[in-house]
Structures are given as structure tokens and as C-alpha cells.
Amino acid sequence: MAITPPENRLWWNEPIERIEIAWIVVAFLWGLFMFFFMIAWHFIGNQNLSTETYKITPAVFEEKVVEFADKYTVGEEAGVPLVRPPAGEDVYLLARLWEWWPVLELKKGQSYRFHLSSADWQHGFSLQPVNINVSVHPGYEQIVTITPTEAGEFGIACNEYCGIGHHMMTGRIRVVE
Amino acid sequence: MTAIDIPVEGIPARTATFRTCRFTGLKVDIAAQRLIMVNAVAAVVFLAVGGVMGLLIALTRWPAVHLLPSEWFYLVLTGHGANVLLYWIIFFEVALLYFASAVLLNSRLATPRLAWAGFWLMLAGAVMTNVAVLQGDSSVMFTSYPPMLAAPHFYLGLILFAVGALIGVAVFFGTLVIAREERTYEGSIPLVTFGALTAAIIAVFTLASGAIILIPTFLWSVGLIPGVDPLMYKVIWWGMGHSSQQMNVSAHVAVWYAIAALTIGAKPLSEKVSRSAFLLYILFLQLASAHHILADPGMSATWKIVNTSYMMYLAVLGSLIHGLTVPGAIEAAQRRNGYTKGVFEWLRKAPWGNPAFSGMFMSLVMFGFIGGISGVVLGTEQLNLLMHNTLYVPGHFHGTVVTGTTLAFMAMTYYVLPLVFQRDIIWPRLAKWQPYLFGGGAAGLALFMMGAGTLGVPRRHWDITFADANLQFELPSGAFLMMGLNGVSALLATIGGGLFVVIAVATILWGKRLDKSNAPLAFPLHKRAEAVAQYGGHATVKLPGTVVLVSIFFVSFVLYYFVNWKYLSELWLFR
């Protein structure tokens, strides 16, 4: 029994049941497959998170976002600048207590280099209803090249707890044809 | 103690007093028995506190109820994590370690006084953290990611708890050494003790990681150092946060083997295979910190892939092996007990009325199907982006820690009460229903949270209508339905969990005493385990039922895995 010492003192010499061997082989191969499939997706897939990251102080990043917004602002939504960067341009999105700033307007099918960082605490970029989720840290600027594949109005929630206003932290991305 | 507490002569224990268990014949060190009792009682108390907090959270996230105001919601959520994920489980695990070493090996416990010191440290730490949380300025969530700052005694409590638990682990190691030196057992340690040893080794790594990162965080909170890097914190903190769950896995797998042995006399199909599977845990489970950094900046894809897969899924392989060997051992034992008709007579006629068995078997099935499969999918580098930090994550770990670990530990309690506390279960008929209520509710919780997460519901979030937000948007209506069903499941789980706490406490206080040699036992301890003889050697074991069960599991796993890749391929493009 499992609660007493093995009856056979030389238990490591006992032959293994066939069914156990068979399952170990199947499970091991499945594990190898899943392992190599992650690597393969970097070559065959179009959804891989970039690891391009730079250290940056929150104040410097904030300046860069403001500069970007000033350059391409075309309007305002609920008091937040609506920013329309040219296709293929670098895009800056600031996470702070408690908003995603500014509102972006992008073109469907065009690629943008998104610069993500936080001005204060950790936040979670959660694009809805697409459901793409990326962690955002203060002090680290992560650059992800994003290509919207559908037009419409998309919300950004924060899914990393960031204090008492966490549930009020939202943002918006508009994608036009 | 009374009549049966006769110290057995000729044993090398120098100071310990023993009694002999009238059910198992095991020699029980009274000092170890008391320590098992206090740790188990502390565990149940924190389960009750954390469980009530869990109910409040679920009722708040139920859109139609939305019970707590936001400040209270975040406060209670912080307390819930610490109380159930750390205190309930680790107190119980310390009790298990003492049981698996001193009791199963017929040995005295090493340094009971040090073990008591560990217990008081753990208790002081647990209370201190709870006080910090309830004071209201430490609603930083269980993970306490910097630069968000809690009160110093929030961190200090966690550190004290970890040090106390480490002492418990050291006492376990010491007891193994004593048992070996004093030759209290023949040959190798039992498989269950081996599983506990696995948990203890992982615990050292886990608790050390916690100390390494929480000590500087504590120093930062009192102003002695200027800050803690948020990314470094996350990598090391999860060396505790996730590895402690691997400790739970090792511990509850050991419990599965123990209950299978106690209820129906199951013995491992092969000691070598089951022990090797535990060894895989020791070697590879610690890499799981990466599961929480997959959507974060700063780590290379190579680092993520190697670590998140536990080095080519070798630790997952360990769990998959137990997923076959535990039901396989049960089937073999049941067939030895005479249930040989068809493919599933052994399963149909299993002791489903014994809450220890039903709890254990549900834990086994749900840990695999709900917690295990979702864990591998969630821990796949790219698939993680689909559900990182959504409610899918709590869905996954309620599948592992609630339907897996907690249910297994509850099942084990039905043995701890008669064997260690020497009290008959007070309401056996009520106890019979307890695992089904709790298991059913917890399974619902896990599944509906996972469903909500795939629809984009963020975790740790007070208001998914975003009513107070400046830029508003709506989640799909299905998400709200899921949250309602989650609330109903939480009610069910609370009834089951509450029943467990009430039965355990009432049994300890008023259950019939079993310490007289002729005291009758109403609760069905086991099902004629004596009848078990050898069943087959190699190549003669036929386990068609287990083959069918494992095949169903494997097909579900593969299908679910590829469905998620299909979802991922439909997302916006990013690189």
C-alpha cells in the first residue's frame, strides 16, 4: 500500500506495467509536441508578443506620449485627445491612474509600433472585445507591432489591479477602414 | 490519554510517548499527534475565514447582487487570497508532513518544541497579515506587486509565516533522519511519505523565494531602501506564488494515494513509476514562475518557452503519469476486491458514500480536466495573451487549488478526525453529501470564471459595466450571465464548505470518542482493505476502465488545446 514501505525492497527492479509505459510514451511525445509548437508559432503564426523592451523613467515616457499626442491630435472624446497617427507610425499609449491615454484612431490592416508603459503602478492592457492582454510595467517601455484586422470601436480595460479606481480605468481605440 | 496509550517497549525513542492506533496498528507519537491537531485546526479556521471572504467576493461580482462597496471588495479580495491560498493550505500541509513522517514511519517527531515554535510563528504571521488587511491600508491583493505599497506588517506577517512553515519543513526532514537512524521502518519510505518529501523539498525553494523578495519589500515599506523593481519582484515572487501551488500538487497527489490505500486498499501499480513522477516534480516544477511573466516585457521568448513548459513539459508529464497511476491503482484494487464485471463495475461500486473516497476521486478528475488542461493552455507562451489576467486565471486556479487541493484535503480530514483526533464523524449522512456539494460548486466556479475570462472579463475588478469610467464600453452579455452562474456556484460551494467546517468542528468537540479499545465506530473507515491480495504481476494487469478514462482525458486535452490556437489565430496581428 502507498502508506506502508514497498513490499518488495528492491522495488526499483520491478518491471513496469505495459499500460504505464504506453501512457508515459504518449504523454512525453505530446509534451514535446506542445513544446515545439510554441517555437513553431514564432515562424508560422501572426500572434507573437514582441520582447523589445527598454528601461525608461516614467517621467520621460510621459513626455514622449504627450509629444506624440500633440503632434497628431485631431479632436477630443470625453475630454481625452483623439489622436490619429499616420499608418506605420510609432504609437504611444500611457497607462496611469486611472486611464489609458490618449484615444487612438488607427487604420485597419496597417501596422503600428505600439509603445506601452506606465506612469505609476502596474497596469494590464486588455483590448476588448478582441481579448488581447499585455502587462504594463512602470520603468519598462515595451514595443509591440500591432495590426488591427477589423474596423470598429474597441475598449481597453485594465486587468492588473491598480488601486481603488482600477474598475474606472478604461481607454479606447477606433479602427477605421 | 487512556487505555490504549501504552508506550510500546523496545523502541529506541528516548523521550516520546506513543499510543498504538487500534485501526491501523500504527504507533503514534503523542507530541506529533498534538501538533497535527493544532495545525489542522488552524487550517480549518483560516479556511472558514477565507471561505466567507470568497463568498462575499462572488456575491459582489454577481452583477445582480453587487454586494460590497469597492473599497471593501478589494480589501476582502486581498484577505481571501492570503487566507485560503496560503494559510489554510500550508497549515494543513504542515499537519500532513508530520503525519507522513512521524505517524506513517512509526517514529517520534524530531524536536516537538521547535515544531511548536514554528506553529506559533505561522499563527502570529497569519494573524498579523489579516490585521494589516482589515485595517484597510493594505488592499494590495495577495500578489502585492510594487510600486503599490502595503503597510509594513502586511509583509512582516507573510515573512513570519514563511519562516514558521520552513521550521515545520525542517522538523519533517529531521523526523525522516531519526526514523531512518532508529530503524522504525523496513526498506524504503512509503510512497505517500515520498510524495510529502517532494512537497517539502519544493517548499524549501518556495519559501526561500518568498523570503528573498519579501524581505527587501518589507525594508522598502519601512523606508530603508528606495524601491523594488516591479519586474524583478514579479519573477521572484512567483517563485513562491506558483511553486507553492506545486507543493500543493505534490501534497494532494500524496493524499490521493493515501486515501486510495486507506479506503479500498489500493497499492501503486509500480512504485518506480509513481516515485519517478514525483521526482519529475522536484526537478522541474519550480520553473513555473514564468507562467506569470508571459505577457510581460523584458524576458526573451526563449526564456519564456523553456520555463513556462517546465523544460519540455516534463513536470506536466509527472502529473499525467499520476493521472493514470492513481485511477489505475484504484481499479486494480477494486478488481482484486471482486468487482471485475465489465469495464466500469469497479467504478460504479466504489465507496461513493464515503466522503473521503468521493472527495478524493472528484479531486483527481477535476484537477485533471479543469485545473490541469486549463493550466497547460494558459501557460502556453502565445495562448496566454488570450486570457492573461482575465477571470480565466482565477478560473484555472480554482480548478487546481479548490477542486484539486482543497477537496483532497477535505477528504483527508475524514481520516484525520477518527485516526488522529480519535473522534467518530458526528453526522456521517451529512458528511456523505459534503464533497458533492463543495466539489460541484467549486467546479462551477472554476468553469464559469474561465468562461467569463474568455469573454474578456478582467480579474480583480469591481465593476465590469464600467459605469464610473470616463470612456465606456460594454462586455458581451454572455459575460454577465457567466458572472451570475459563478455566483450561484459560489453559494453551492459555500454550503459544501460550511458543512465541512461545521462537521469538522462539531466532530472535534462532540464526536464520540474512539480512544477506548471497544468504542464503536459508525463512520465507514475503509471497505475491507484486508481482503486485498496481490493482483497480477507485470503483463497480467488489465485496467480497461482506466484506459477509457485516460483516453477521454487525452482527447479532451488535445481538442481544447487546438481550439485555443484557432481563437488565437483570429486575433489582431502582433509581433
Image (cartoon, coloured by chain):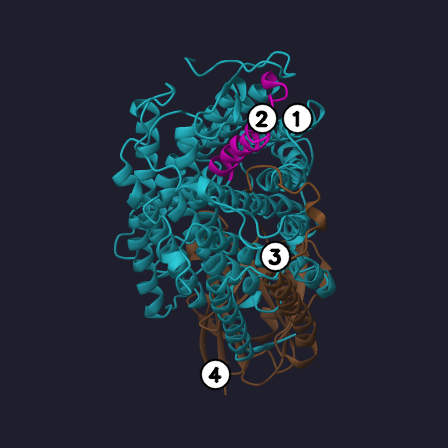
Chain colours: A brown, B cyan
Determine the main secondary structure of the stretch shown in magenta: helix
Judging depth in this view, the residue of B147 and B117 nearest the camera is B117
Mark 3, other Cα within 10 Å: few <14 / some 14–19 / many ≥20: many
Q: Which chain contains the residue that carries disc 3? A: B
The amino acid marked with disc number 1 is Ala
- Rendered image: mark on residue B106: 2
Q: Which chain contains the residue that carries disc 2? A: B
Judging depth in this view, the residue of B201 and B258 nearest the camera is B258
Label 1, label 4: how far apart the Cα atoms are: 69 Å
Percent across and percent down for residue B342 are: 40, 65
- Rendered image: mark on residue A151: 4
Percent across and percent down for residue A47 are: 61, 75
The amino acid marked with disc number 2 is Asn
Label 3, label 1: how far apart the Cα atoms are: 38 Å
- Rendered image: mark on residue B49: none
Percent across and percent down for residue B436 are: 32, 50
Query: Do marks 4 and 3 share a subunit?
Result: no
For mark 2, give the secondary structure: loop
Q: Which residues are magenta?
A: B86-113
Q: Are marks 3 and 2 in contact (CB under 8 Å)?
A: no
Q: Read off the residue under disc 1.
A: B179
For mark 1, give the secondary structure: helix
Q: Nearer the viewer, mark 4 or mark 2?
A: 2
Label 1, label 2: how far apart the Cα atoms are: 8 Å
Mark 3 or mark 1: whose residue is earlier in sequence: 1
Mark 1, other Cα within 10 Å: few <14 / some 14–19 / many ≥20: many
Q: Is A14 positioned to the left or the right of B450 in the image?
A: right
Q: Are marks 1 and 2 in contact (CB under 8 Å)?
A: yes
Q: Is B327 positioned to the left or the right of A40 in the image?
A: left
Q: Residue at x 43, y 42 (%)?
A: B263
Q: In the picture, which quadrant includes the C terminus of chain B?
A: bottom right
